[in-house]
Image (spheres, rainbow, N blue to C red):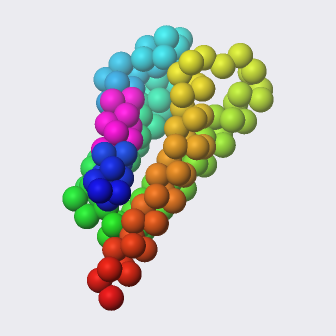
Amino acid sequence: MERICLQVGVALTAAILLFVGLSGVLLGVKFLHGTESASVDNYFRFLSAMAAGMGVMYLRAIPHVERHGECISTLTFLIFIGGLAHLYGFTLRPTPTVATLCALTMSLIVVPLLWLWQRRVARGASLRSS
């Protein structure tokens, strides 16, 4: 049962990354109501595509989530580092939007907890198979 709940959590995380990433790719900085400069818009689309790619990597891990510790660890590290960048930006402009607070919560709390949960499920699966 715990494994199934983890799979649902990974699927929700993947869905969020895919939605945000693809929205950013398709809409550019307009997705965040930003001003449109060609270089900023291009870079935003690039980073959005990376987020969508992370969502795809999470999707790949769902069927055998207990075996994909390395992938989930790498994704967690990348997302956590991005969260620290969000937090740094918050210190520079301390008027966060709801989207910023959600991104901070996901990247600094939810995703690391998901990683810990995956480690727990993997450890349990390892003990059961030995």
Q: Quadrant of residue 101?
A: top right
Out of 123 and 75, give the one closest to the viewer: 123
Residue 93 higher or lower than 1, as above or below: above
Q: Is residue 15 magenta?
A: yes
Residue at screen point 72% across, 36% down: 88
- Looking at the image, residue 34 sits to the left or right of residue 51; the answer is right
- Looking at the image, residue 66 sits to the left or right of residue 111; the answer is left
Residue at screen point 39% across, 65% down: 121
- Looking at the image, residue 84 sits to the left or right of residue 16; the answer is right
Residue at screen point 58% across, 25% down: 100
Could you tell me residue 22's position as x and y percent? 32, 30
Q: Quadrant of residue 93?
A: top right
Looking at the rendered image, the quarter that the C terminus falls into is: bottom left
On the question of residue 124 being in view, the answer is: yes
Most extreme residue toward the front, as rendered? 1
Out of 79 and 62, give the one closest to the viewer: 62
Out of 45 and 115, give the one closest to the viewer: 115
Residue 81 higher or lower than 29, as above or below: below
Residue at screen point 60% across, 17% down: 97
Q: Is residue 122 magenta?
A: no
Most common SS among magenta residues: helix
Q: Which residues are magenta?
A: 11-21
Could you tell me residue 84's position as x and y percent? 66, 43
Out of 3 and 60, give the one closest to the viewer: 3
Could you tell me residue 75's position as x and y percent? 45, 54
Most extreme residue toward the bottom, as rendered? 130
Label count reads 0
Could you tell me residue 1's position as x and y percent? 29, 56
- Looking at the image, residue 117 sits to the left or right of residue 91; the answer is left
